[in-house]
Amino acid sequence: MENKKICVIGAGPSGTAVLRAFQSASSKGAVIPKIVCYEKQHDLGGLWNYTYRTGIDDIGEPVHCSMYRYLWSNGPKEALEFADYTFEKHFGKPIPSYPPRAVLADYIKGRIENAGVRNWIKFRHPVRWVEHDPKTDKFTVTVMDAVNNTQITEVFDYVICCSGHFSTPNVPHFEGMEKYTGQVMHSHDFRDAAHYAGKNVMVVGSSYSAEDIGSQLWKYGAKTVTACYRTKPLAFHFPDNWEIKPLLMKVEGKTCTFKDGSKKDIDVIVLCTGYLHHFPFLSESLRLKTDNRMWPKSLYKGVSFETCPKMMYLGMQDQFFTFNMFDAQAWWARDVILERITIPANLEERVKDSEPWVEKEKDLDSDEKTIRFQGDYVKDLISLTDYPSFDVDAVCDTFMAWEHHKHDDIMGYRNNSYRSIMTGTMSPAHHTKWADELDDSMEAYLRC
């Protein structure tokens, strides 16, 4: 086992879950393989590492970060808490339920520092190419060492792709956009809502990015917020300066025409139109091709690439569950590598294993069904490993309470508190209501 080498691509919540999973096994006496984690950014944390940069980063790579200043968690921290490293353990006290970005980034990093595996990560090492040799059943991984400006190639027994799927924008085209006289951007490049105070801003889309960026724009003083949709509108009770429109059809100057024929002058357009599963560093035989869905195509147990099982992907699902789902996947992947779990040798068997999940996915016509579907998936994985058991159904219940709170008050739902599933502790209320709190620093947040 010690002669095996495992390549982990990315040191965000998914990649660091893999590191923690192997460290956990090692701490219990298991012999583990050599783990090498390649991360193109200067620090771990993935999307949770904020940068002012857009476009290209300081080493010539596409900027990974899709987060913005003043971002607060849009779901309860109690629903994403690590089962093996609680918020209370990390911060030394109970904290409110909706942390800002810096707090969550610190929490992710704290678990890895506590586990002592930061030295398994090679920072500023973007992966350039991965290919698999069926004859040797080995992977050749080519990486750019941006620290020393050299390209290196190594051979691995397994590759675990943890690069995420929320960093390559899906950018639709609208008639006249080339001559639009306002400002247009994808949400990936949105950085500061305060810049748009006094402006008429439109968010295109009807999912979480549109909902949250629109809320930020309202909070920081946009004159009006218009949200246009393709399939279904955002169904919340928004403030008076919000307007819901059907899909944008064309742009002339600053005048936007919508599907119902109505028009409105817009200063800034933010395309909250989602992201692509994009893996340009993977050879064709290894590349996952899927849309954003609860059960991604071609993954056995939602993790192992069906046609090449030693190629694994973490966190590729559309998500209600996040950090603790990534953990469940990481522990499962680890146990496959440690030969505690056997993947069926026959491709047909691997494909057949997904069929019940695919059928259930077709019936997901409500948030509650979707949440509990993903909860069942997490329970299935946890039952196969020694990941600390927790009450997944209670997490689902917390998600449902969150949904109701959002529909009751979309601008005030972050003022609610929930009980930790892991510790049983009730979270305190934040000292300032979210709409009035303009300081998103960790220092201000923890002053409770």
Image: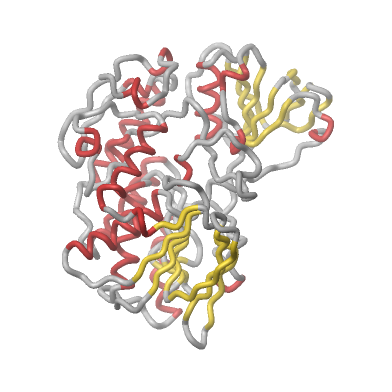
The x and y percentages for residue 410 are: 43, 22
Left or right? Give the position of 357 relative to 378.
Answer: right
Quadrant in the picture for residue 273? top right
| Residue occupying image coordinates x 76% and y 37% | 174
Q: Is residue 196 above or below residue 1?
A: above
352 is higher (above) or lower (below) than 146:
below
Q: Residue furthest front?
A: 148
Considering depth in this image, is 444 or 334 the residue closer to the camera?
A: 444
- Tell me where residue 159 appears, x and y as whole percent: 45, 68
Residue 232 drawn above or below residue 276: above
Can the viewer see residue 122? yes
Residue 272 left/right relative to 2: right
Q: Quadrant of the C terminus?
A: top left
Q: Quadrant of residue 259?
A: top right
Inspect this view and state whether residue 316 appears: no
Question: How far from the left and from the top, in percent, is residue 215?
Answer: 51, 22
Q: Position of residue 362 (x, y in %)?
A: 47, 54
Q: How many marks?
A: 0
User: What coloring was used for the rendering?
Assistant: secondary structure
Task: Identify the residue shown where x is 19% and y is 62%.
Answer: 27
Q: Nearer the viewer, residue 292 or 67?
A: 67
Relative depth, front residue between 118 and 284:
118
Q: In the figure, 73 relative to 144: above or below?
A: above
Quarter the N terminus occupies: bottom left
